Image: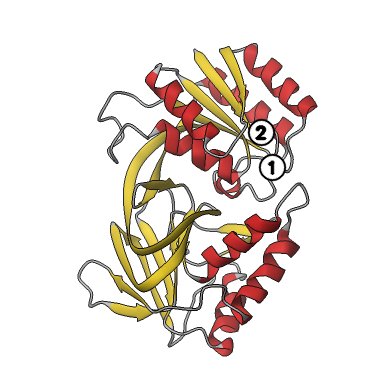
Amino acid sequence: MRAVLIVNPQATATTPGGRDVLAHALASEVKLDVVETDYRGHAMAMARAAARDEYDLVVAHGGDGTVNEVVNGLLADTDGKPGKYGPVPMLGVVPGGSANVFARALGLPADPVEATYELLRALEEGRSRQVGLGLAGDRWFTFNAGLGWDADVVGEVEKRRGKHTGPSLYMRTALACYLRPPHGRPQLTVQTPGAEPAQVRTVFVSNTDPWSYLGARPVHLNTECSFDTGLGLFALREMGAVAVLRHVRQSLRTRSKHRGKQLLRHDDLPIIGVTAEEPVSLQVDGDLVGRQTRVEFMSVPRALTVAI
């Protein structure tokens, strides 16, 4: 098996020593190349090159941003249709960030050494899982995407983030962006199959549940959503304090069932269209993509095979 290990040395929980242990362990099982990323988009370029060179396995060691770049690189030549241009390399994930949402959703250990051990066992036993992914325009996402409030939070955190990024930074930034939206709060129009267009102020699109930027504390928005279903939609028609606090509390409860007059919520959707009256921030997997006036979210079943 030919494999490449893509390491983000700037990720919160990655260290040179951990990288060496991981590389040594993997090299005992596969023919391994190791690449460290130097700039934003480097992991995507390396994963795309690995797919074109027909590697069998690409392992991402970093945070969710690194994983997202690797996924987008692996699927860059598929035109939204995995398998269209031949087999895509299998993905391996060894957490190295502050949140590691995708790894947690897959049930992987948060500790990089334990995750490495699980990856080696999966390779030895031939264990893997096909997972569905989401597309936001031409950008793949693994666990969620959003327009509005959460994307503004991601953008503000990116200005401050570093090795000390943690749940408290996200919470402080979420409050600040709620009280003073950096780009205002334009109206969004949501279109789902078989339904009338709806006017909302913020949109969350989930590819699995739960997910979290709050350490090990799970956030539940679409409890029926998983890697084996379509997308989950969670949107608020207005952002009044009473409605926001209600849904924040409900999202932190186990097996939460959201209720409220301002809520628009659907599970297992194949496609979601969102248009904005003026440009609004878009994030995918916790990375700011930019500001958009129209985004089409699409569910792609069995898009990628993960060693697990």
Pick the residue in front: 42 or 122: 42
Q: Earlier in the sequence, mark 2 or mark 1?
A: 1
- Could you tell me if residue 111 is visible in this image? yes
Whether residues under marks 2 and 1 lie with C-beta atoms below 8 angstroms apart, the answer is yes
* In the displayed structure image, the side of residue 57 where residue 10 appears, left or right: right
Q: What kind of element bears circle 2?
A: helix
Local packing at callout 2 (Cα closer than 10 Å; few below 14, some 14-19, many 20+) is many
Determine which residue is flagged by label 1: 110
Task: Measure how far apart labels 2 and 1 are at the Cα level.
Answer: 7 Å
In this rendering, is residue 84 above or below 197? Answer: above
Q: Residue at x 45, y 19 (%)?
A: 56
In this rendering, is residue 280 above or below 306? Answer: below
In this rendering, is residue 137 above or below 200? Answer: above
- Horizontal and vertical percent position of residue 248: 59, 76
Q: What kind of element bears circle 1?
A: loop
Q: Residue at x 62, y 60 (%)?
A: 218
| Amino acid type shown at disc 1 | Ala
- Horizontal and vertical percent position of residue 8: 65, 34
Determine which residue is flagged by label 2: 115
Q: How many marks?
A: 2
